[in-house]
Image (spheres, rainbow, N blue to C red):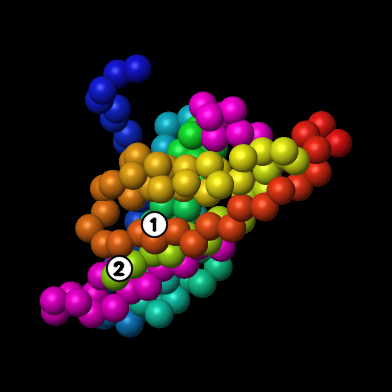
Amino acid sequence: MSEVHHYAARTVWTGAALGPTLTYDGYSRDYSVEIAGKTPLDCSADAVFRGDPDRHNPEDMLVAALSACHMLTYLACCARARIAVVAYEDAASGTMAMKDGRMRFTEVVLRPRVTLAEGANVERARRLHATAHDTCFIACSVNFPVRHEAEVILGAPFGD
């Protein structure tokens, strides 16, 4: 696997069709994110910043990216350790606040709930969350704490 990976996105302000930025309150925050070969995302600012609450916003997508990256990294760790994960869900949340005179994320908390196949090593699976955290590409790229409060439980036998 290459040590360098490149990603590209095209962001287009679709709100321009509703008028120019003549006043802070008067312009649309709607935009589209286009990634080659993928379905475009209709986005906006968060509603507290005068955006459309029905559209994806950058803050939600950052929390989702951290959650997804942790999940994918954790699943890879479990696969390498031959631990059978049969279900995974996360109730992630992020906090933005004023810090050092700027509005910024101050933390994201991941709350994964992992179900393992019966007979799996629960303690090892719990420890793998720390490994996943330390190697998650997105978590390693942000300048605020990303905490995880994982729950790991045993489920039904694999294949049932």
Q: Is 91 included in the stretch rendered in magenta?
A: yes
Q: Position of residue 125 (x, y in %)?
A: 55, 43
Residue marked by disc 1: 62
User: Picture quarter containing residue 118?
Assistant: top right
Q: 126 above or below 100?
A: above
Over which residues does the magenta segment extend? Answer: 78-105
Residue 53, numbered label: none
In front of the other: 100 or 40: 100
Helix, strand or loop under label 2: strand
User: Picture quarter containing residue 85?
Assistant: top right
User: Relative to residue 117, is residue 31 drawn left or right?
Assistant: left
Whole-number angstrom distance, CA of label 2 to CA of label 1 = 10 Å
Residue 105, numbered label: 2
Residue at far left of view = 100
Helix, strand or loop under label 1: helix
The residue at the point 47 percent across, 53 percent down is 67
User: Relative to residue 80, is residue 86 drawn left or right?
Assistant: right
Q: Which quarter of the rendering shows the N terminus?
A: top left
Q: Position of residue 124 (x, y in %)?
A: 53, 42
**Magenta span: helix, strand or loop, mainly?**
strand
